[in-house]
Image: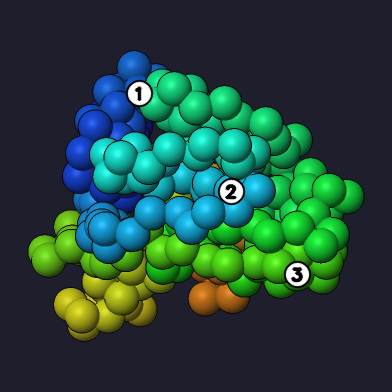
Amino acid sequence: MSDGSDRPRVAVFRPDDERIDAAVELLRSLGAEPVPDPMLEVEPTGAVPAEAPLVVLTSKTGVELADEAGWEPGAADLAAIGPATAAAAHEAGWTVDVVPEEYTSAGLVAALEDRVRGERVVVARSDHGSDVLLDGLRAAGAEVTETVLYRLTRPDGAGESADMAAAGELDAVAFTSSLTVENFLAAAADRGIEDAARAGLADAVVGAIGPPTAETAADRGVDVDVVPDEASFEALATAVVDALDAASARTD
């Protein structure tokens, strides 16, 4: 752990593109020392959403890939899981009709369940999407088709943060999806340091971007300290750094 004289070290796991760059910049602006360790790599499938009256988009990445492939929503209504996804859709020139109050699969179901009975709905997302969304929409009476726009894999060489956690050199981690939790632990296991990395997390501030990510962590034996009210990286990073500041103040 940091001795208090240095900026606290915070691991971040976003894909190795503008998202990791923005995360690093934000953490530095908040007074932390980022440890960028991308745990997700995007592999486009080349698929585009099938035709339907309602298309549900669950990530900025999915929007960008569909746009790059030349897809247009046409007469379809669009639902976006949160503001970042909606902003990407607006940038593509599309109109977004539904953004849930809670930026999760369960939030999308709650926002859509009164309008989808008997409706064909396409859910366009990654290959690691939650069953909560598909099952919830089907329970509401929708005819649901899933289009996998991209696969998410663990990049070769990912795991610097696991080494640092095992050595007691991380002050915090910011998990941005269930898959980042799973891939962090898998990277630690591949290195033969899973128990030590878990011990390092127990001594660190563990942040999860939302309840589903926190639940995944808990299911895998990782205690979560921070879940922000808003499921965005900015809110997560701010909450993690605030928790570090509070912990530091208690030890001064």
- The residue indicated by pointer 2 is 55
* Mark 3 crowd level (few <14, some 14–19, many ≥20, 10 Å Cα): many
Mark 1: amino acid: Leu
Horizontally, is 149 left or right of 250 in the view? left
Mark 2 against mark 1, which lies toward the viewer? 2
Residue closer to the observer: 198 or 227: 227
Where residue 61 sits, quadrant-wise, is top left
User: Regarding mark 2 in the picture, which secondary structure is present there?
Assistant: strand
> Where 181 falls versus 204 (above or below)?
below
User: Mark 1 touching mark 3, by CB under 8 A?
Assistant: no
Mark 2: amino acid: Val
* Mark 2 crowd level (few <14, some 14–19, many ≥20, 10 Å Cα): many
Identify the mark at residue 88; answer none if there is no mark.
none
Check the image and name the residue furthest to the left.
157
First reached walking from the N terminus: tag 3 or tag 2 = 2
- The residue indicated by pointer 3 is 138
At x 46%, y 63%, the residue is: 147
Return the x and y of residue 82 as percentages of the image width and height: 59, 36
> Where 12 falls versus 125 (above or below)?
above
User: Regarding mark 1 in the picture, which secondary structure is present there?
Assistant: helix
Horizontally, is 173 left or right of 189 in the view? right
First reached walking from the N terminus: tag 2 or tag 1 = 1
Return the x and y of residue 240 as percentages of the image width and height: 50, 37
Residue 229 visible within the image = no
Q: How many marks?
A: 3
At x 18%, y 77%, the residue is: 191
- The residue indicated by pointer 1 is 26
User: Mark 2 touching mark 1, by CB under 8 A?
Assistant: no
* 3D distance between C-alphas at marks 3 and 2: 14 Å
Return the x and y of residue 192 as percentages of the image width and height: 21, 82
> Where 85 falls versus 184 (above or below)?
above
Residue closer to the observer: 60 or 238: 60
